[in-house]
Image (cartoon, grey):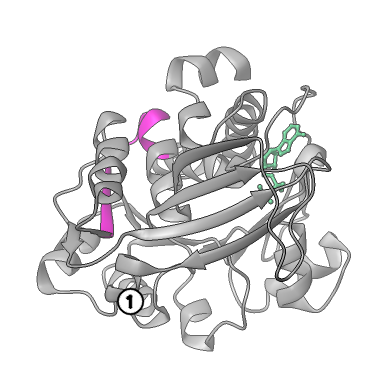
């Protein structure tokens, strides 16, 4: 199975013609609450893609916590190890203007309480096939998870977002790194994806760099890098495209499919996601992915 160690956030999104300047008040057009958090998004994506998925993390004792947990369970994610921590859930306060530009404040809330793993969590990780990690939880917990996975030969798949300098030990415990183009450039210090992949392969054995509408680049040590094009679709909302990609990729890898094929299938999943509005609500189910990928 797949274990996701990561964040849950309620996205509170205000749609306005123009974002307010400091000290200014503007009247917006619409407000939406969208369940998110990179961890939860990847868990939903993997479960819908047909994976057997458990989520480790925390929600708060507010109403958002109930909704966030429900979002996961209704897509079939096991939340037995998703703790309920006294206090607010994680929230992201997002202002989207008419140009599609956004400004975001993230308050970790319950996510910030996940600083270390207990024996129960370690046991679940060590019996998994893959562990999915991102950087929206305290780094100490991410490292704990990566170490436990490495000790037991569990494949670790790291999404380095929000991008930040990574401790060498975390990279040493990572089997597959999946940055987007910007994250890859920031981590490698090289703008070109091929160049970035070459630099990143000195630290991890396999890299998939996602390239938005251009697809993705798969690179492994000692092999020629492969570009996998994305299906041509009309993008309506690219929120959570990367998380959909990683969730589906993990499922395909777990089924033993070769990387190029897994990446093609994950691209089909992500393309379905960007054709629809929403974040986790717009993620495709396995039958849709199979149909689109065939
Ligand atoms: P992130 O969403 O993390 O910034 P990307 O923008 O690279 O990451 O998108 C992740 C994946 O989603 C891409 O590799 C691609 O498969 C898919 N995707 C994103 N945008 C599009 C698009 N406009 N058309 C088709 N697929 C897309």
Residue 69 as seen in the image, left or right of residue 33: left
| 106 up-or-down from 2: above or below | below
Disc 1, SS: helix
Residue 129 as seen in the image, left or right of residue 290: left
Q: Nearer the viewer, residue 211 or 110?
A: 110
| 155 up-or-down from 213: above or below | below
User: Residue at image x 61%, y 20%?
Assistant: 293
| Quadrant observed for ligand 1 in the rendered image | top right
Q: Nearer the viewer, residue 224 or 272?
A: 272
Q: Position of residue 71 (x, y in %)?
A: 32, 36
User: Residue at image x 37%, y 55%?
Assistant: 8
User: Residue at image x 66%, y 28%?
Assistant: 271
Q: Position of residue 76 (x, y in %)?
A: 26, 32
Q: Can residue 255 be seen?
A: no
Q: Quadrant of residue 107?
A: bottom left
Q: Which residue is mark 1?
A: 141
User: Residue at image x 36%, y 29%?
Assistant: 50
Q: Nearer the viewer, residue 143 or 19?
A: 19
Residue lying furthest left: 120
Q: Is mark 1 within 8 Å of ligand 1?
A: no
| Classed neighbour count for the residue bearing mark 1: other residues with Cα under 10 Å, few (<14), some (14–19), many (≥20) | many
Q: Can residue 231 be seen?
A: yes
Q: Which residues are magenta?
A: 46-58
């Amino acid at each position: 199975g797949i274990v996701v160690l990561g964040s849950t956030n309620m996205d509170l999104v205000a749609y306005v013609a123009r974002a307010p300047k400091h000290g200014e008040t503007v009247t917006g057009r619409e407000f939406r609450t969208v369940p998110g958090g990179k961890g939860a998004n990847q868990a939903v994506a993997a479960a819908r893609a047909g994976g057997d998925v458990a989520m480790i993390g925390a929600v708060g004792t507010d109403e958002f916590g109930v909704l966030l947990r429900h979002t996961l369970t209704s897509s079939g994610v096991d939340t037995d190890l998703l703790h309920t921590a006294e206090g607010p859930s994680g929230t992201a306060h997002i202002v989207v203007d008419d140009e599609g530009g956004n400004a975001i404040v993230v308050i970790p809330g319950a996510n910030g309480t996940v600083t270390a793993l207990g024996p129960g969590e370690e046991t679940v990780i060590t019996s998994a096939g893959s562990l999915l990690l991102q950087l929206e939880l305290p780094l100490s917990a991410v490292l704990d998870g990566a170490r436990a996975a490495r000790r037991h030969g569990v494949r670790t798949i790291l999404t380095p977002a929000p991008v930040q300098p990574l401790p060498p030990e975390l990279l040493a415990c990572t089997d597959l790194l999946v940055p987007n183009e910007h994250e890859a450039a920031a981590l490698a210090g090289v703008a070109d994806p091929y160049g970035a992949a070459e630099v990143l392969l000195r630290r991890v054995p396999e890299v998939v760099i996602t390239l938005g509408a251009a697809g993705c680049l798969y690179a492994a040590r000692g092999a020629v890098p492969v570009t996998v094009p994305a299906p041509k679709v009309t993008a309506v909302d690219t929120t959570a495209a990367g998380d959909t990609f990683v969730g589906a990729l993990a499922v395909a890898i777990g089924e033993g499919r070769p990387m190029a094929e897994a990446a093609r299938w994950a691209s089909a999943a992500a393309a379905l996601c960007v054709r629809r509005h929403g974040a986790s609500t717009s993620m495709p189910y396995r039958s849709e992915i199979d149909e689109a990928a065939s």
